[in-house]
């Protein structure tokens, strides 16, 4: 009995240690799962993209022309996208944009069960990036605004985080603008990654996609700020409503907030449909220069020449011919006819030979 009493207290710590080990193993299993890896990849890549992009806008607004220009904003977003592709491209595809994720699901390139995983990861990354920029530039923000955070007006700072239409834009013109720009983005992304067409060189996808984003911003970004990404616009807008800008972030621009959410989804699908219908590699013949023959012939590999022995051979010498001392005489052979096996494909049909070289 005393021994049993001593064993019981020792077994409880062991059980607790074993339970803790089981919990750790389960957590490791959760984070090592493919779905969790993709979630974290989208979260981190979107965070990096947004920190660089929002930081460039903050420097331009709060520091003036000494710390940024419209070009620097576009370059920051473009290279932020490039860095995000490097971080998550091999794990989740580095969408960083729920409109791209939505289109991938529509096209059957990924399962719909991954759509909420990708979207939540992107939104969390974007929201945390907004909080980060707010914290890093808090003193500059307070000095610039004197503590009065406004959405519109000469000292407006809500545009650091979310997009708002220009004064010359109406709501529906802005909707068309965002739809069109996102369609261009999706169409060009499909072209860049289409291995059967003319894709970007291996290892250059991140740079080319970043250049694509910069190009869209430099040429077509004035009207609406080219959100082209619900994950880029809605989470920062929610953050600003919490951080002190108030509900005006949702009512400004004739309640503009829903346009960067809905229009990119529609535009991305339209861009994909246009590419796959009119340009997609599935509609391009694999051998454009090949001549179409009514009855194609399958060419076999060349075979060694076969020596055909003629059946007309000289008669075997008889014993009588040897007995009288005369030598055997060989009967003359008829002229040899060419064997079909000794002819080359080119001599049979130059057209077939040319066809063979084309397919090689």
Image: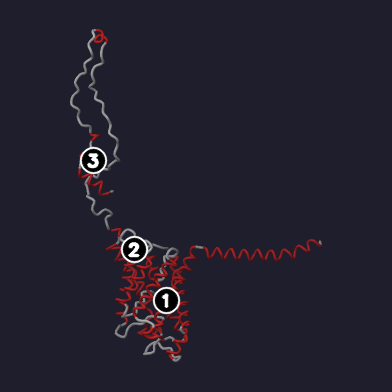
Q: Are marks 2 and 3 in contact (CB under 8 Å)?
A: no
Residue 323 seen anywhere in this rendered image of the structure: yes
| Of the image marks 2 and 3, the number of the one nearer the N terminus | 2
User: Is disc 1 placed on a helix, strand or loop?
Assistant: helix
> Residue 257: x, y in percent?
38, 80
> Residue 40: x, y in percent?
48, 68
Q: Where is mark 3, residue-wise?
A: 345
As drawn, the label of residue 215 is none
244 is higher (above) or lower (below) than 43: below
Q: Is residue 185 left or right of residue 342?
A: right
Distance Cα–Cα, label 1 vs label 3: 64 Å
Q: Where is mark 2, residue-wise?
A: 200
Residue at 23% across, 18% down: 314
> Residue 252: x, y in percent?
37, 85
Would you identify the image quadrant in which residue 11 lies?
Answer: bottom right
User: Is disc 3 placed on a helix, strand or loop?
Assistant: helix
Q: Are marks 2 and 1 in contact (CB under 8 Å)?
A: no
306 is higher (above) or lower (below) than 150: above
Q: Where is mark 1, residue-wise?
A: 52
């Amino acid at each position: 009995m005393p021994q049993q009493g001593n064993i019981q207290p020792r077994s409880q710590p062991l059980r607790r240690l074993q339970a803790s080990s089981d919990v750790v193993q389960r957590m490791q299993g959760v984070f090592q799962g493919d779905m969790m890896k993709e979630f974290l990849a989208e979260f981190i890549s979107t965070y990096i993209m947004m920190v660089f992009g929002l930081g460039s806008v903050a420097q331009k607004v709060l520091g003036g022309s000494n710390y940024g220009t419209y070009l620097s904003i576009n370059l920051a977003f473009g290279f932020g996208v490039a860095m995000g592709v490097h971080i998550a491209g091999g794990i989740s595809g580095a969408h960083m944009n729920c409109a791209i994720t939505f289109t991938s699901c529509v096209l059957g390139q990924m399962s719909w069960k991954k759509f909420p995983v990708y979207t939540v990861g992107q939104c969390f990354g974007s929201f945390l990036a907004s909080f980060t920029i707010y914290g890093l530039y808090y003193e500059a923000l307070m000095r610039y605004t004197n503590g009065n955070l406004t959405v519109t007006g000469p000292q407006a700072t809500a545009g650091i985080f979310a997009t708002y239409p220009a004064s010359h834009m109406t709501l529906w013109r802005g909707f068309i603008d965002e739809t069109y720009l996102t369609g261009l983005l999706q169409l060009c992304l499909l072209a860049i990654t289409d291995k059967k067409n003319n894709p970007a060189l291996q290892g250059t996808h991140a740079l080319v996609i970043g250049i694509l984003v910069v190009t869209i911003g430099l040429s077509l970004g004035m009207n609406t700020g080219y959100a082209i990404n619900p994950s880029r616009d809605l989470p920062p807008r929610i953050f600003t409503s919490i951080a002190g800008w108030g509900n005006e972030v949702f009512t400004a621009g004739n309640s503009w907030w829903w346009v960067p959410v809905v229009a990119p989804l529609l535009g991305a699908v339209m861009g994909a449909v246009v590419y796959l219908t009119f340009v997609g590699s599935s509609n391009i013949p694999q051998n454009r220069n090949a001549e179409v023959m009514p009855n194609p012939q399958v060419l076999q590999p060349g075979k060694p020449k076969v020596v055909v022995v003629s059946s007309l051979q000289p008669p075997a010498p008889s014993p009588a011919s040897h007995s009288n001392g005369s030598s055997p005489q060989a009967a003359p052979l008829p002229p040899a006819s060419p064997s079909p096996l000794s002819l080359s494909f080119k001599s049979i049909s130059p057209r077939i030979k040319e066809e063979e070289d084309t397919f090689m």
